[in-house]
Image (tube, helix red, strand yellow):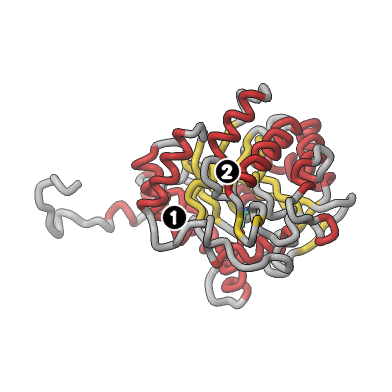
Amino acid sequence: MTNFPPRNFPRTRLRRPRQAEWSRRLVAETRLTPADLIWPIILREGAGVREPVASLPGVERVSIDLAVEAARAARDLGVPALALFPFTGPEHRSPRGDLALDRGNLMCRAAEAIKAAVPDVGLIADVALDPYTDHGHDGVLVGGEIDNDATVEILVRQAIVQAGAGYDVVAPSDMMDGRVGAIRDGLEAAGYKNTQIVSYAAKYASALYGPYRDAIGASGVLKGDKRTYQMNPANTDEAVHEMALDVAEGADGVMVKPAGFYLDVIRRARVEIGAPTYAFQVSGECAMIEAAGANGWIDRDRAVMESLMAIKRAGADAIISYFAPWAARALG
Ligand code: PBG
């Protein structure tokens, strides 16, 4: 573009192609389709249960039978995959998050049920201990610190359990060092050669995860913050470093999270890493749009579409978003 000869008005009128809808459609540079979206599902125990999450309007915790319904809906809407997360009450949490390794846990039973009913929808499991620890951290605490290497050992076993239950993708969201390589070796050794790893490689210590922590039952229990393992929002070279390392360790795709405040990082992932690029439009991003929309301060529907388009335009191949089912329906 910059090498073009000089242009000037009125020979150049950039408004010309914007006059009619047909023309705007024809020259659109970015297209958003249901195939770009991943639908996050928050699981809970029980049957026929839908439980609203106050801080995340429009999202409900659902029991496994309704998660199966969601998988059918995803298939019918053309949404390729679901990302599953479990709600765990305080009574089932423990210092080391033992429930993460239980082959009969909610995550595993959900994968089995969904794969039996709707095998062609992709299933993504979050690998991290925060749904299971009594202190709400993603790893284990040793002497008041999150112990990297002890955590990685547990995460490898968690990922193998998830792969065994039927997850197509394991997505480590814990930000421990060395976990992607360890999980990749573990999966190979256990015979899960085709299980993908999509690493939350550039995951920031963000203020935008609050509603999610409410949804999985971690808010009340979380002690302190996650700044010794999640990234400083000031940094982007470090994000490239993280992503390159994870790809070298065997990740099939990398994730940037949150999405909307980190479009520059998504762009760098696309341009400098070149692996499949995922972006997570997190709970707080969705909650902000819903809240402003509910107040009549912005047009909620347009803001949702614009937010997703911006993430795609920045360079994401796939977007995890709580808006996925609504947006897929709206996109037809
Ligand atoms: C943690 C995890 C988090 C999210 C997904 N996996 C939160 C955190 O790091 O505390 C956030 C998702 C969201 O806000 O929608 N393993």
The residue that disc 2 covers is 34
Give the total of numbered labels. Answer: 2
Front residue (pair 13, 165):
165
Residue furthest out toward the front: 143
Rendered position, 213 above or below 116: below
Q: Residue at x 12, y 53 (%)?
A: 7
Q: Is residue 75 left or right of residue 266?
A: right
Residue furthest out toward the right: 47
**Amino acid on which the number 2 mark rests in the picture:** Pro
SS state under label 2: helix
Residue furthest out toward the left: 5
Q: Nearer the viewer, mark 2 or mark 1?
A: 1
Disc 2 CB within 8 Å of nearest ligand 1 atom: no
Percent across and percent down for residue 295 are 60, 77
Front residue (pair 130, 309):
130
Percent across and percent down for residue 308 are 50, 54
Q: Bin the neighbour count of mark 1 within 10 Å (Cα to Cα): few under 14, some 14-19, many 20 and up.
A: some
The residue that disc 1 covers is 310
SS state under label 1: helix
Rendered position, 219 above or below 315: below
Disc 1 CB within 8 Å of nearest ligand 1 atom: no
User: Quadrant location of ligand 1?
Assistant: bottom right
Residue 95: in sight, yes or no?
yes
Percent across and percent down for residue 265 are 40, 52
**Amino acid on which the number 1 mark rests in the picture:** Ala
